[in-house]
Amino acid sequence: MHQNIYTIEPSSFVTDIVIHDYRTADVFRKYGIDFCCGGKWSLDIVCQNKNLSTEDIIEELSKIVRQTGSNAALDFDNWDIDFLADYILNVHHRYLKRALHEVKEQVTKFLDGHRKKFSELEELETIINRFMKEIPPHMKQEEEIFFPYIKQIHHAHKHRESYARLLIRTLRKPIEEVMLKEHEATGSNLHRLRTITNNYTPPDKACIAHKVTFAKLKELDNDLVQHIHLESNILFPKAIQMEKELLQDN
């Protein structure tokens, strides 16, 4: 739990606000504000571009920051990055390996019985199939290449190992060219899911299958948003900074 209430100003960057308290992501998502890969803008500029009241958005965000809760207690930004990598692996990767198959099965089952009535939802199947094709190899690359390397860099940085320079392979280029672009693609697909489903809101008198399908999609969305946020905004930038410092030290 935060001991000091974080003060949100018009000049505060969207990404910084979410890094401080992840629960604020719900507000940004509500108004279609990108807080992940594109969240490098100040709040006042974002609100101007969206024709939103900066004061109203700050008030909504501040109410969340003032609340106590388990998410606020998870101070991801101050975790050691090797621990953060393990958290992503054991929480988010493990969840996705199970949930992707469950969501695909649920969407397929729902559409099989409702395709004619809700033809506009057929795109859900296309997007989930895209996730099934793209996300597992992305996670495998992280598990087999990126995360072990990040842990190695963290150990060398923490102990100021003399051999550290020999380990450096420069994360920035592969992260920018592969990891972050794939994160952006996932973010675009999530945005499309929200649009198609009206932010996962089933229509009046929706059947149970409809409600369950949207609930599972929303759960998947929430997990992917936090997953991408932890990697793009905290884990990868910190690892790149450690590389820089190790090169300067040796």
Image: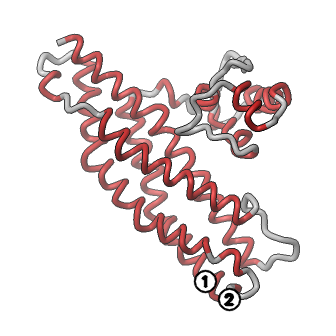
Residue at figure coordinates x 46%, y 38% from the top left: 232
Residue at figure coordinates x 68%, y 58% from the top left: 194
Residue 204 vertical placement versus 73 (above, below): below
Residue underneath mark 2: 113
User: Is 99 left, or right, of 148 in this rendering?
Assistant: right
Residue 239 vertical placement versus 204 (above, below): above
Residues at discs 2 and 1 in contact (Cβ within 8 Å): yes
**x, y (%) of residue 91?**
47, 49
- Which part of the image, by quadrant, shows the C terminus? top left
Residue underneath mark 1: 109
**x, y (%) of residue 108?**
58, 81
Numbered disc 2: secondary structure? helix
Looking at this view, is 169 or 242 the one in front? 169
Asked whether residue 73 appears in the rendered view, the answer is no
> How much space separates mark 2 and mark 1, taking CA atoms?
7 Å
Which dot marks residue 191?
none
Q: Quadrant of residue 149?
A: top left
Q: Quadrant of residue 10?
A: top right
- How many marks are shown on the rendered structure? 2
Q: Quadrant of residue 212?
A: bottom right
Look at label 2 and name its amino acid. Answer: Gly
Looking at this view, is 169 or 82 the one in front? 169
- Mark 1 crowd level (few <14, some 14–19, many ≥20, 10 Å Cα): some
Look at label 1 and name its amino acid. Answer: Lys
Numbered disc 1: secondary structure? helix
